Structure formats: structure tokens, C-alpha cells
Amino acid sequence: MTNVAVLGARGRMGKTVCQAVTDADDLQLVAELDAGDEVTRETVAGADAVVDFTVPDATKGNVLAALAAGCHVVVGTTGWTDAGLAEVEAAAGAAGRNVIIAPNFALSSVLAMHFAALAAPYFESAEVIELHHPKKLDAPSGTAAATAKKIAAARAASGSAAMPDATAADPDGTRGGLIDGVRVHALRVSGLTAHEEILLGNPGELLTIRTDSFDRQSFMPGVLLAVRKVGGLPGLTVGLDHVMDLPGR
Ligand SMILES: NC(=O)C1=CN([C@@H]2O[C@H](COP(=O)(O)OP(=O)(O)OC[C@H]3O[C@@H](n4cnc5c(N)ncnc54)[C@H](OP(=O)(O)O)[C@@H]3O)[C@@H](O)[C@H]2O)C=CC1
Ligand SMILES: O=C(O)C1=N[C@H](C(=O)O)C[C@H](O)C1
């Protein structure tokens, strides 16, 4: 039996994770913590693994505290910087505990990112559109940022030329943000949950890769997989694709 503590337990994702852990035969929910609760050896109540779905401003502090409390950590919260990841990697090494951070635990989204990276070298244009519920705090989504970075890395590795774009003026920023040279567009619309579209184009053809999370249940198989695997993946792992060991990575 693996003991699990959930941080952000009163949030949209945290509540869903608490239920999924409770429903799993091999996992036991031992602590539900939220804003205002300290993360200590006592409050995590013997957890082997801590799951963090909180807010970008709090997640790094939570991860460092959970490592100090002797736990492995699985993180879904977005907003990570390279410096923050390096700090966590060092802390995990020092504590002898492991951390998995994934911008998206939905299998459809992990596969969409993977397919986009595989396809990117074959197209001259690539842009990312992410669509979310209006209560989301950060933009662009962590998933869209990761997607853009994977596309950019694949294009760089294959020596792709710069994308064609004749835009000479964009005073209102309607061409979207640029992440590693890839355009990213963020939509916030009531009724949506979490969605992403990746458009890859050549003269006369278009490949559209789309992923839709209609329900937060979609993230649970990935979260539980990470909880079950984190003890065996030394140090810091970023992205569920590494946990799933996808072919062609
Ligand atoms: N990786 C993935 O697959 C997914 C990632 N996410 C990401 O997960 C995060 C949470 O999303 P969501 O559940 O929708 O957000 P919510 O706002 O619904 O939940 C966040 C919860 O964390 C609490 N909280 C705030 N500060 C702290 C703290 N210091 N310690 C503990 N808890 C705290 C909040 O409390 P209060 O409201 O009182 O501030 C709230 O209950 C976001 O970054 C989101 O982008 C979301 C879905 C999937
Ligand atoms: O805030 C959300 O809802 C989501 N956040 C993650 C992100 O920023 O990529 C994952 C998913 O898109 C849902």
C-alpha cells in the first residue's frame, strides 16, 4: 500500500485526485492539505508520495517542504521556470527522494505533444492554440509552453528554416506570444475545461492535432501512474512521456 498526501485538496484538481486515490485499491489517502496548511513530516502523516495541484506561486515551496519531509512528489501545478526545476533537482538529490513534474497528465495531451514533435520537422509552419476555462490563473498553459518547446527543439534538431510570416505590424499582439520561436495563442472561454490544438502547415496541406479534456477525470490515470512510478524514477523527471516510456522519444 502506498500512502498519499494531496496538496491543494480543496481545489478542482485536488478534490478529483483525493477521490481517485481513495478509489484505488493499492493507494491510501493519508492527508488532505490546502492553503494555510504547513507541509511537514507531521502534516503529511506518513505519506510515501505527496501530490501537488496548488498554484504557481506556491508549488516550488511545497515540493521543497515535501522532500524535506521525506516524501516523493508528483506535481501537476504549472508555472515552473528552468531555475525552479534546477533547485528541485538539487533538493531531490540531497534528500534521496524523487519528483515527477508534468504539465499535463491526460494521456491524449501527452500523446498530442509527442505527435507534434514527431511531425514538426516535416512542416514549415507550426502554431499552438490552447483553450481553457476562465478561472485558470496562468497563460499560456503549461501544456502549450511545453508543446511549443518540443516543436522548437524538433525543428532545431532537423535544421528547419524560419517559419514564413509576412506580418509587418501587430500593435495589439493579436499574433500571440512567442515561445522558443513558436506562436502560442491562449483562449479563456466559459464552458471549456482544457483543450489544445496544434496546427502544422505546408503549402496546400494542414495537419491538425487536437486534444480535449472535457472532465478532470481525464488526468487521473496519468496522476495515479506517476504516483505508482515515482519511487522508482531517481531524481527529477519532467513530463509524463518519460514515465510512459513512449517509443520514438
Ligand atoms: N498537470 C496537469 O495535468 C494539470 C495541471 N493543472 C494545474 O494544476 C493547478 C491547480 O489547478 P486547479 O485545481 O484547477 O486550481 P484550483 O484553484 O481549483 O485549486 C488550487 C488549490 O490550491 C490551494 N492553494 C493555494 N495556495 C496553496 C498553498 N500554498 N498550499 C496548498 N494549497 C494551496 C487553493 O486554495 P485557495 O483557493 O484558497 O487559494 C485551491 O484549493 C494549476 O496550476 C493548473 O494549471 C490543472 C489540471 C491538470
Ligand atoms: O489549469 C488547468 O485547468 C490546466 N492546467 C494545465 C496547463 O496549464 O497546461 C493542464 C491542463 O491544460 C489543465
Image (tube, rainbow, N blue to C red):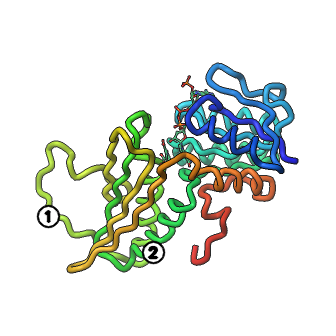
> Of marks 2 and 1, which one's residue comes earlier in the chain?
2
Residue 119 versus residue 80: which sits nearer the camera?
Answer: 119
Name which residue lies at 82% across and 49% down.
25
**Quarter of the figure with residue 87:** top right
Seen from this angle, which residue lies furthest left?
A: 168
Q: Amino acid at mark 2?
A: Ala
Residue 44, position as x, y percentages in the image: 79, 31
Tell me: 144 left or right of 83: left
Give residue 192's mark.
Answer: none
What x and y, as percent, mark residue 41? Answer: 83, 29
Disc number for residue 166: 1
Kind of residue at disc 1: Ala
- Disc 1 packing (10 Å; few <14; some 14–19; many ≥20): few
- Please identify the quarter of the rendering in which residue 19 is found: top right
| The disc label shown at residue 157, or none | 2
Q: Is residue 161 visible?
A: no
User: Closer to the observer: label 2 or label 1?
Assistant: 1
Quadrant where the C terminus is found in the figure: bottom right
In the structure shown, which secondary structural element does the residue marked by tag 1 occupy? loop
Report helix, strand or loop for mark 2. helix
Judge the density around disc 2: few (<14), some (14-19), many (≥20) Cα neighbours within 10 Å: few
Position of residue 176 relative to residue 245, above or below, is above
| Residue at the extreme top | 36
* Direction from residue 161 to residue 241 in the image, left or right: right
Q: Height in image: 149 above or below 205?
A: above
Q: CA distance from mark 2 to mark 1?
A: 25 Å
**Left or right for 50, reference 238:** right
